[in-house]
Image (cartoon, rainbow, N blue to C red):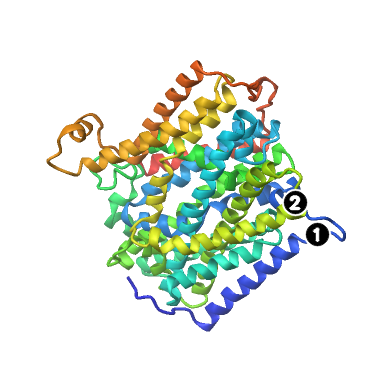
Amino acid sequence: MLSASNHLSVLDISITALYAVAIFALAQFVSRRKKNEAESPSGYFFAEQQLPWWAIGASLIAANISAEQIIGMSGSGFRIGLAVASYEWMSALTLILVGKYVLPVFFRNGVLTMPGFLAQRFGPSVKTLMAVFWLMQYVLINLTGILWLGGTAVTTVTGLDPVAALVLLGGFALAYQISGGLKAVALTDAVQVSLLTLGGLIIAAITLSRIGGQASAGGMAQGFHILMARFPDHFHMILPKSSPYYKDLPGIAVLVGGMWIMNASYWGFNQYIIQRALAAKSLPEAQTGVAFAAWLKLLVPVIVVLPGMAALILAPGIETSDHAYPTMMTLLPHGCLGLVFAALVAAIVASSASKINSVATIFTMDLVKPAHPAMSDRTLVRIGRLASVAAVAIAALVARPLLGHFDQVFQFGQSLTGFFAPGIVVIFTLGMLWKRCTTAGAFTAVAVGFLASCLFYYAAWLHGLSGLAGWQAWLVVHVPEMPFLNRVGWVFWIALASCVAVSLVTRDTGAARTADLKTIDFGTRPAFNAMALGVIVVLAALYITFW
């Protein structure tokens, strides 16, 4: 790895500074209020439910493609190869299914937050439990991961201390959105995603051209062919069991197994993602937005995974895979480096702002407001801003102790999220589809899902030890070691069975509330149908080509 030093020229710094000033000014402009217009929670947290489809699609990708994705997936591309792109490409198909089947249920029931849906369906106890869980996940896993990996990238390029870098990034993300809330975030994300895409294409093109030996389209194609010829094992979407990384991406399970549970939890029942769609002008507008995001998802591996794979030739001595992307950045000529660096900062800032806003939304609307229903709108918005500041402060403090020793932070984050995703998918799916599902059943699904995940994880750890006896030896014999995606799949079925069993022997005191699917129109407009069909055709072609 190249040593951490300042690789930025005056031109690069100027480009980055121009971006920072422009995006800050744009955020303040788009979120300005009319004269005498009062500030409200609906406006601050949900953009008055007036977001257009293009802002929804761009904001979904900006919220998702963070330093955790860029740095982490590029590092996984360096270690594992193109197979890690399944996270992106299967997400595209998941988005289509969310638009078709999940959004109509939420819109029909007036859902604005995920804890809010749980409150409708199961009452305040499940809502409070999950609200606290999501707050902890967003701050301690998501926001912390974004800022730590973002700080790592900035350190490699500029020589700044990583903690100082993450504090600056978090502070800027907080400052540019704290006044305007979701509207400031979503309406500026079109610019952020455009810059991110342009920067990603530049670094992919230049690194492949350097491998190919000429700065042209022919050089890029030649570089790609050289990379395939020298590292053919890195160009398989479905890893064989003999792969040392099978435990991360277990073969066919990426298509039919636990990855579906992870994707459903993330794209369908995750506040900082689904909040953009629920703030749409209408259901069709939201559906078109998620279809647009699905198309953008198809492009993500080109701008994220390929640069990491290029490092196999251009920087083979990298010791920590998460340094692959920032190391590739240091190979860029000045000017291009400034643009790509600004794009990376854009990704970090956009995704950080999304997490910050959703933390404030859940804390204020699902915990504070129900406890103090008479609280004024102005006070609620002020509390939301204070929650935003607290989230950034906590993430900055715990980033190095939590993540500083991991080689692949992206894979670590996915594995940790997998402890909770099965239970979340169970309670939302049964909550929407099965009237008989009870509050006790929902609690059971969450508890059993987490405990079963811990059991499988502990058993996997025991498999690496010798000389075991008693119950530990029994556990090793009866609980096989398995990749975490397979674990997620098994835990989902265990949690589902537990929820069903407990629901059948318990009763809720109040009337069960669930969506009457007969009154919901699952029909979609021709534009959505055409975009969805296109995504499916492209995905089929990609998996056939790189099977």
Snapshot quadrant of residue 124: top right
Q: Which mark is residue 33?
A: 1
Looking at this view, is 45 or 372 the one in front? Answer: 372
Dot 2 lies on which element?
helix
Q: Give the total number of marks visible in the rendering.
A: 2
Q: Position of residue 513 (x, y in %)?
A: 65, 24
* Any part of residue 60 in sight: yes
Provide residue 366's location: percent of width, then percent of height: 64, 43
> Where does the N terminus fall, quadrant-wise?
bottom left
Residue with the most extreme top position: 505
x and y percentages locating residue 257 in the rendered image: 39, 33
Can you identify the residue that label 2 sits on? Answer: 43
Q: In the rendered view of the protein, which quadrant contains the C terminus?
A: top left
Q: Would residue 216 be seen by someone viewing this image from the given angle?
A: no
State left or right for residue 83 relative to residue 283. Answer: left
Report helix, strand or loop for mark 1. loop
Q: Out of 529 and 305, give the one closest to the viewer.
A: 305
Q: Are marks 1 and 2 in contact (CB under 8 Å)?
A: yes
**Mark 1 is on which residue type?**
Arg
Label 2: few (<14), some (14–19) or many (≥20) C-alpha neighbours in 10 Å: many
Q: Residues within 10 Å of mark 1 (few under 14, many from 20)?
A: few
Residue projecting furthest to the left: 467
Q: Is residue 449 left or right of residue 352?
A: left
Under mark 2, the amino acid is Gly
> Does 186 appear above or below 335?
above
